[in-house]
Image (cartoon, grey):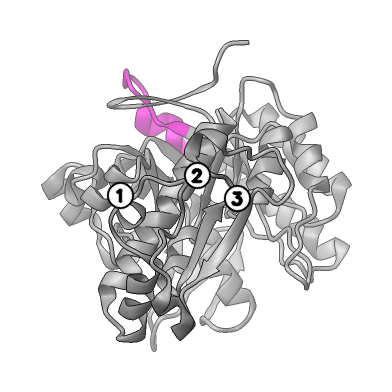
Amino acid sequence: MEDKLFKYRYGQIKLPVFFPDATRGVIKMLDFKDVEETKTLGVLVNTFHLWQGLGKNVLEKYGDIGNFMSWNGALISDSGGFQVMSQVKKGIVNGKIKDEGIVLYPGKNKRLVFSPEESIRFQVKLGTDMVIILDDFTDPKSSYKEAYESVKRTLLWAERSKKEFEKLTKGKKIKPYLLGVVQGGESLDLREDCTKELVKIGFDGLGWGGWPFDEKGKISFKSAEVISKNTPKNYLLHGLGIGKPEDIVKCVSLGFNIFDCVIPTRDGRHGRLFTYNAGSMDKIDVKKKNFYSVFTADRDINLLDSSRVSVACDCLLCKRYSRGYLRHLFKIGDVTAMRLASIHNLRFYSILMEKLQ
């Protein structure tokens, strides 16, 4: 069977692949040299946050977001709709979700509209290798009627996004992938309808959108199965925000091949490090149950531990420093601890992708 590839301006990546979140063009505590050395092949940026905080003039000066960041790996731009819409729907941000787009009221007599077309326009300026359209996030507490309305708006926005994308990229030899997003919550019939309609509109791949977790943080894969079953085999499938190692393994078995999440770097900054339950890198088996553990550098007894964080890892932390030294760094609040832990977790995830190929 021929390997499925993610092609980008500087090369191609064998799938599956994990993109850590560089939301505002940076991964906290790391520079991109650190990221490259973990064998991380791509990162994801957030369109909405960059639209608000960076603007198009900077992009015009530098050419694209990759040049601005000095990052030569693959790049995905997420629309940012999930973050801002969840805040609007919870009342944290003053705004409304309308057919025209996300309407924000940042101050008295101020009105900002982040429309599907504006999202596409800004993402094309970002110059990323995959563009993710703006979708209407289905709140996990939505009624069936509310979920239906979010799917209806998602499809409306998808048609408008595709039209704007084709207009802006017409005649270009190299075009980014265009990804639609499937909504519908846990209503499997809505998920199926949304998937089929997005395929009719025509995309390079689909993303599993929404919030698939229950109150205990457990994930339901039923909607992922529906999406995979109703998607052409040549489509890319993106597990948006899917980041627990065991969930990634399950999603790959269902046909998903692109993932992004804050988990490896966020957990690293909080002293949670993923480690393979194996005596060496060669002996890692990600198909086994309980193939990894979590080491937490939060106890003083760790100061006496001279062992490596993991013998099945070749990152900077594991090649050079002990568990005891890492605990010392966290205890004194030195940012080096967060940097080393983030580096380690990113290497854990790049190894995971290597083992799943």
Task: Please report whichever mark, 3 or 1, sits nearer to the chain's N-terminal start.
Answer: 1
| Amino acid bearing label 2 | Ile
Instruction: Report the mark closest to the observer, 2 or 1.
Output: 1
**Helix, strand or loop at mark 3:** loop
The reply, left or right, for residue 58 in relation to residue 301 is left
Residue 341 visible, this angle: yes
Q: Per the image, is 124 magenta?
A: no
Q: Is residue 22 visible?
A: no
Viewer-side label of 3, 1: 3
Q: Which residue is mark 1?
A: 35
Segment tinted magenta in the rendering: 164-177
Q: For residue 132, which numbered disc appears in the image?
A: 2
Q: Is residue 169 above or below residue 140?
A: above
Vertical placement of residue 286 versus 148, above or below: above
Q: Nearer the viewer, residue 157 or 221?
A: 221
Q: Nearer the viewer, residue 345 or 29?
A: 345
Residue shown at the point (27%, 79%) measured from the top left: 334
Mark 2 residue element: strand
From the viewer's perspective, is 283 left or right of 113? right
Tell me the crowding category of disc 3: few under 14, some 14 to 19, or many 20 or more residues within 10 angstroms, Cα based.
Answer: many
Q: CA distance from mark 2 to mark 1?
A: 23 Å
Q: Considering the numbered disc 1 on the image, is that residue within a helix, a strand or a loop? A: helix
Residue pointed to by mark 3: 277
Q: Quadrant of residue 82?
A: bottom right
